Amino acid sequence: MNDIKQKFAKLRKVFGPAWLVMMADVDAASIITAMQSGATFKYQFILILIALIIPLYFICEVAGRVGAVTKKGLGELIRENFSKKLSVALSFPMAITDLLSYVAEYVAIGVGLSMIGIPPIISLPVVYIVHIILVFKKEYKTTEKYLLIVSVVMLLSYIFFMMRGISFKYPLLPTNINRNFLFLIAANVGAVIMPFMLFYQTTATAKKDT
């Protein structure tokens, strides 16, 4: 019985960061990519997205295990096992990617809240301040609890609206593999499997496990 409790406790420690990493894929850019894929090719991307679950699972699993075992983030591990130069070189593309992701997210926040009557001049500063407070307080466990609740609400909302619009008249297999189709495949792969996953999940799991 104690072994089962210990295994459940370990699973719970890894589950939070892994779940948030996967839910973070449902950001503004990813939603736009999914909408474009569905609007252009209907259900022809469903099997591709299902197949992407396999590498996504292994990436999240490895990242979680690395953080739980080493108690260190991926950047720190690269610096210790390879070199400072390599860790710095890897940090530049990550920094650029993060910057562009933040821009996209804040644009989406501004657009989304403006749809319910809150102008960006008010919404963006407030969201930014809340974001900064969360970062500097470094209370990961507390933040995770709230984000897990939000993510469950999001998931149930997606399932509800998805079930309302299901139609069986569209094919599941691609009927015309052209440049647009290949471009959207690349976009969907990038939306599902992101470099920040490894860095975030190893660090989050390490900090949560200590």
Image (cartoon, rainbow, N blue to C red):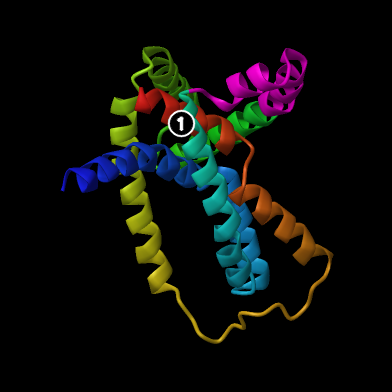
For badge 1, the amino acid type reads Val
Q: Where is residue 37 in the image (x, y as percent from the top left)?
A: 64, 63
The answer to whether residue 99 of the structure is visible from this angle is: yes
Quadrant of res 126: top left
Q: Which residue is drawn at 39% across and 72% down?
A: 163
Q: Where is residue 104 in the image (x, y as percent from the top left)?
A: 61, 36
Q: Is residue 52 above or below residue 3?
A: below
Q: Residue 29: within the magenta?
A: no
Residue located farthest toward the bottom when viewing the structure as drawn: 169
| Secondary structure predominantly adopted by residues drawn in magenta | helix
Q: Residue 93: within the magenta?
A: yes
Residue named by callout 1: 69
Q: Which of 79 and 131 is in front in this view?
A: 79
Q: Is residue 93 above or below residue 109?
A: above
Q: How crowded is mark 1: few (under 14 residues within 10 Å), some or many (20 or more)?
A: few
Q: Residue at x 63, y 28 (%)?
A: 98
Q: Where is residue 114 in the image (x, y as percent from the top left)?
A: 46, 38
Q: Is residue 53 left or right of residue 156?
A: right
Q: In this view, does 147 lie above or below 127?
A: below
The answer to whether residue 27 of the structure is visible from this angle is: no
Q: In this view, does 32 lie above or below 131?
A: below
Q: Position of residue 83 (x, y in %)?
A: 73, 17
On the rendered image, what quadrant is the C terminus found in? top left
Quadrant of res 44: bottom right
Q: Nearer the viewer, residue 201 or 160?
A: 201
The residues colored magenta run 72-96
Q: Residue at x 38, y 39 (%)?
A: 14
